[in-house]
Image (cartoon, grey):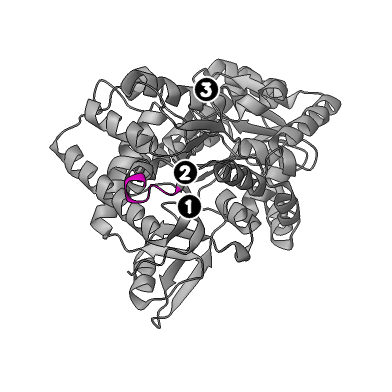
Amino acid sequence: MASSRSAPVLVASNRGPVSYDVGEDGSLNAKRGGGGLVSGLSAIGPEAGALWVCSALSDGDREAVRRGVGEDGVRMLPIPADVHADAYNGIANSVLWFVHHLLYQTPLEPAFDAEFRRQWASYETYNRAFAEALAEEAAEGAAVLVQDYHLCLVPGMLRELRPDLRISHFSHTPWAPVDYFRMLPDDIADRLLRGMLGADRLGFLTRRWADAFTACCAEFTGGLGETLVGVHGLGADADFLRERSHRADVEERMAALREEIGEGRRTVVRVDRTELSKNIVRGLLAYRRLLESRPEWRERVVHVAFAYPSRQDLAVYRDYTAEVQRLADEINSAYGTPGWTPVVLHVKDDFARSLAAYRLADVALVNPIRDGMNLVAKEVPVVSDEGCALVLSREAGAYEELGEDAITVNPYDIEQTARALHEALTMPAGERAERAKKLTAAATALPPAQWFLEQLNALNELSAR
């Protein structure tokens, strides 16, 4: 592709704002995505001339690139499927995700062998494709906002190609502490850190993750050099959530859920992808322990658990999803009665149904092992009709902002979590409403558009190195 060098603002991420599928008649159908980045980029307006560089993820995406079909302001990169699979599943999701979320079973894993090195080469190829595309498209002195652990090498690569640019990188995950990060081969740890330090500015969701990164740099690279570090705690989009949660499809799903729950029962709600880090299994174990230790809750409470499948091309995720289903069935078999299903589990993704559950929630259970932020913890108090109590893991990034008004738990402690559920369910209505009000204020302090603009403005204030 010929160099255009016209975009003054560029965003780079693995997944873009649009995806395509091929219809039976061969036509291409576009589907717009959502999320904080989409909201953020829309905040600067189409007249800004911004460009989103992303990967063609599906066969439909690659066909769109082949046909030259696309949306204004989006450039999809047709990275070969095998290279993307190695970079995305082999390295980003099976190594970097596991390191930052402390997920390895260390007696058995990781084992950084020849296959790892082969996949790492693909990760470098994948990152280089982004760096080269950004270098081609960016106007002189443009602002480039690179997103997440998939693209850690891009800032350094792009800096070499275009030293005139202002470059940022934002981490949407936690960052591993030094002792865990050093599990990586020394040269790989160095490569990742120096890749990110090619940026003028690095962003993290909490001070804890920013400090962990800074500590890793002090250990492995001698410090941050000229790179600045900032903290931007992504908040919930209250206006969108409130409007969307009162549409007809949500009302329909509320009626269906009420029927499943039964008249007059309390609800403990969780909505998660079946990520290993989300700790759904221990949440179910804690709910089972509540029913064991507090028999007065039998027939009076329902755990509404939405566990939407994630990364099902990885065996460990398929096994985890199956364990969630097995445990829910076991609880229902042990405690259920003809008129009461203790766990209402849904595994098919349905955003309207999730919002319906938010509105019905008396208690929100958010107990991740480790989470960069966790927007569910912020969204449920905003949407809940009566104001909900929040049981929150101290290992969620959201704890930094919401911990004072939540009931905090150690995510590994089943007994403590069961007690926290009881405390949340018995919280007086006035206290619950007051806490929910404070939770909502904290949760919406930096909505997506403002979150994005805050980073862009900070980057624009810098002179390119």
Name the spot of residue 322 as percent of width and height, x first: 40, 41
- Marks 2,1: beta carbons within 8 A: yes
Q: Which mark is residue 379?
A: none
Q: Which mark is residue 141?
A: 1
Tag 3: Cα neighbours inside 10 Å, few (<14), some, or many (≥20)? many
Q: Is residue 129 visible?
A: yes
Left or right, residue 181 beside residue 302: left
Q: Which mark is residue 411?
A: 3
C-alpha distance separating marks 1 and 3: 45 Å
Q: Residue at point 45% right, 32% down?
A: 227
Tag 2: Cα neighbours inside 10 Å, few (<14), some, or many (≥20)? some
Left or right, residue 437 beside residue 126: right
C-alpha distance separating marks 2 and 3: 43 Å
* Residue holding disc 2: 464
Assign a secondary structure to mark 1: strand
Taking the magenta stretch, the answer to whether it contains residue 164 is yes
Of marks 2 and 3, the one in the foreground: 2
Q: Which residues are magenta?
A: 159-165
Name the spot of residue 150 as percent of width and height, x first: 37, 44
Left or right, residue 401 beside residue 229: right
